[in-house]
Image: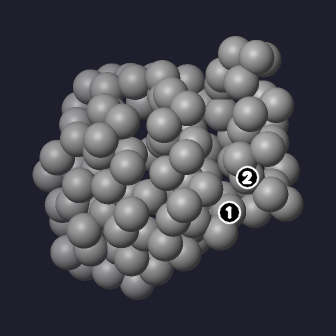
Amino acid sequence: GFSDKTLNLIAESYPNLKYLNLGGHGDRLITDKGLYAIANSCHKLEYLSISDRKEFSEISIWNVIHSCSKIQQLDIYKCGITYRTIKEIRLYLKIKYINLNTATQYLKKIETAIDNISIS
């Protein structure tokens, strides 16, 4: 599995990384610190999956959104995000696909907030 130490090594060794799947079962070996390392070094990311990672705070997810502007596919299913994160995605990313788990009442707002996006 991944740990913060592993993510730091990935961030240092692969700054041109385009695809990263950190989706898991919340083993708690990675924290916001590891996600910050990726966000601060891997600015060419195009695909990121952090599904099932409730241990990441919304602030660390916002850091990724702000720092990795080339992300086109984002998997944030079961991350416990709020509508504020959707607004951040709309402002900072030209996203083509997003996978999230949210209440159906927010889907209309999300579809309105983000144009030309595939939501599942």
Q: Is residue 112 above or below residue 69?
A: above
Q: Residues under labels 1 and 2: Cα distance? A: 8 Å
Q: Are marks 1 and 2 in contact (CB under 8 Å)?
A: yes
Residue 95 as seen in the image, left or right of residue 40: right
Q: Is residue 10 above or below residue 23?
A: below
**Amino acid residing under circle 1:** Ile
Q: Earlier in the sequence, mark 1 or mark 2?
A: 1
Q: Position of residue 46 (x, y in %)?
A: 57, 70
Q: Position of residue 86 (x, y in %)?
A: 57, 42
Residue closest to the eye, 93 or 39: 93
The answer to whether residue 37 of the structure is visible from this angle is yes
Q: Position of residue 13 (x, y in %)?
A: 25, 78
Quarter holding the C terminus is top right
Question: Secondary structure under badge 2?
Answer: loop
Q: Which quadrant of the figure has residue 16? A: bottom left
- Say which residue label 2 marks: 114
Residue 34 as seen in the image, left or right of residue 39: left
- Say which residue label 1 marks: 95
Residue closest to the eye, 92 or 38: 92
